[in-house]
Image (tube, rainbow, N blue to C red):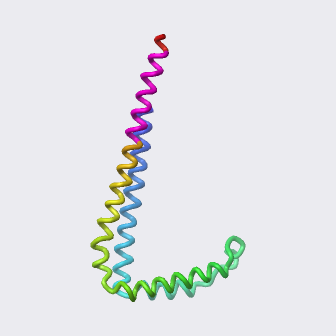
């Protein structure tokens, strides 16, 4: 059981690390594109994307269209507000990795507590068998 706890911990750590690394790379790309003005162009193109008819069965197309317009407006506003996106990246990346460290600590504490509970339960069950 202890091995299972630590295997789950390792799998969760791999996913957690991959998620943070992917988020950092995506934010670096997004901020670099925003500094070049490419994101505003991309947002304008994405805002013109026609909503497929089959999607109307699952989601209200008017709501999705308003969501597209809001996204375009947000990206255009951000491209005006953040002319120096590289300066922003200098503190976003360390902040992401600090969050990774906090998440890692939570996972580690959970694994250690699980390990200790299994160990204590094992000793308690061995004592009850000897009685």
Q: Is residue 100 left or right of residue 70?
A: left
Q: Position of residue 47 (x, y in %)?
A: 55, 85
Magenta-tinted stretch: 111-128
Q: Residue drawn 39% across and 66% down?
A: 23
Predominant SS along the magenta part: helix
Q: Which residue occupies the foreground of this view, 56 or 91?
A: 91
Q: Position of residue 18 (x, y in %)?
A: 39, 58
Q: Is residue 9 magenta?
A: no
Q: Quadrant of residue 32?
A: bottom left
Q: Is residue 113 magenta?
A: yes
Q: Residue drawn 67% across and 82% down?
A: 62
- Location of the N terminus by quadrant is top left
Query: Is residue 129 depicted above or below 68 in this figure?
Result: above
Q: Position of residue 112 (x, y in %)?
A: 37, 39
Q: Residue drawn 52% across and 81% down?
A: 71
Q: Residue furthest top?
A: 131
Q: Quadrant of residue 101?
A: bottom left
Q: Is residue 124 left or right of residue 35?
A: right
Q: Residue drawn 40% across and 41% down?
A: 111
Q: Residue furthest right?
A: 57
Query: Is residue 126 depicted above or below 50 in this figure?
Result: above
Q: Position of residue 41 (x, y in %)?
A: 45, 88
């Amino acid at each position: 059981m202890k091995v299972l706890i630590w295997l789950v911990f390792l799998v969760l750590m791999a996913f957690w690390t991959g998620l943070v690394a992917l988020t950092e790379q995506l934010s670096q790309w997004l901020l670099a594109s925003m500094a070049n003005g490419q994101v505003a162009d991309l947002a304008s193109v994405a805002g013109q994307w026609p909503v497929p008819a089959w999607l109307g069965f699952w989601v209200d197309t008017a709501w999705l269209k308003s969501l597209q317009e809001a996204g375009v407006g947000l990206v255009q506003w951000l491209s005006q507000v953040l002319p120096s996106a590289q300066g922003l990246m200098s503190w976003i990346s360390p902040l992401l990795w600090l969050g990774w460290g906090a998440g890692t600590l939570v996972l580690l504490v959970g694994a250690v507590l699980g390990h200790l509970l299994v160990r204590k339960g094992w000793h308690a069950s061995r004592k009850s068998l000897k009685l």
